[in-house]
């Protein structure tokens, strides 16, 4: 019950942050504040969890993925087993490969990873 309520709260919060996912920072010095979770805190949570599919790791990432999918900002392939594992793997790979961007909000960085991996339209495989 607690996890379901926490996840629904995270998804609602991400809905308000969605414009941040779609736009790059106007100035590299400008900080995007989307939530109380920083990118380094999210990554540390995923590392500590031992299992990246735990709610404290995957919940945040999947919230961004679901919102972007529903909003048609990304076009992931149909996956009969669900895209949760793939979404978490894509986001964590991107975050680990770009430590120079960890000062940016995780909602923005996770969104960028999904836009690169799951483009819509002409950029789609």
Image (cartoon, rainbow, N blue to C red):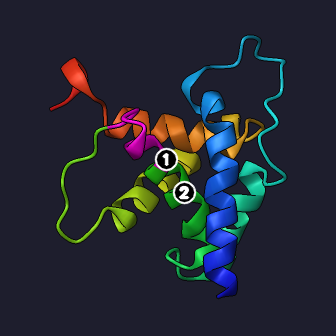
Q: Secondary structure at mark 2?
A: helix
**Residue 5 sits in which quadrant?**
bottom right
Residue at the spot of label 1: 67
Which residue sits at x=70%, y=19%?
25
29 sits left or right of 75 in the view: right
**Residue 47 sits in which quadrant?**
bottom right
Which residue sits at x=61%, y=69%?
57
Determine the residue located farthest toward the bottom in the rendered image.
Answer: 1
- Where is residue 54 drawn, in percent x and y? 56, 79
Q: Pointers 1 and 2 in contact (CB under 8 A)?
A: yes
Q: Report if residue 99 is visible in the image.
A: no
Residue at the spot of label 2: 63
Residue 72 part of the magenta-drawn span: yes
As displayed, is residue 21 above or below residue 25? below
Region rendered in magenta: 67-74
Q: Report if residue 77 is visible in the image.
A: yes
In the image, 82 versus 114, the foreground residue is 82
Which residue sits at x=61%, y=78%?
4
37 sits left or right of 63 in the view: right
Q: Secondary structure at mark 1?
A: helix
- Where is residue 17 drawn, in percent x and y? 68, 38
**Residue 59 sits in which quadrant?**
bottom right
| Crowding at mark 2 (Cα within 10 Å: few <14, some 14-19, many 20+) | many
As displayed, is residue 11 above or below residue 71? below
106 sits left or right of 120 in the view: right
């Amino acid at each position: 019950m607690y996890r379901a309520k926490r996840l629904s709260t995270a998804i609602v919060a991400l809905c308000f942050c969605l414009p941040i996912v779609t736009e790059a920072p106007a100035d590299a010095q400008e900080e995007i504040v989307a939530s109380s979770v920083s990118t380094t805190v999210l990554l540390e949570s995923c590392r500590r969890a031992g299992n990246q599919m735990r709610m404290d790791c995957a919940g945040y990432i999947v919230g961004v993925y679901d919102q972007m999918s529903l909003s048609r900002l990304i076009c992931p392939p149909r996956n009969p087993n669900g895209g949760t594992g793939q979404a978490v793997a894509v986001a964590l790979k991107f975050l680990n490969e770009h430590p120079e961007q960890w000062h940016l909000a995780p909602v923005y960085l996770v969104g960028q990873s999904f836009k690169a991996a799951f483009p819509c339209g002409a950029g789609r495989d």
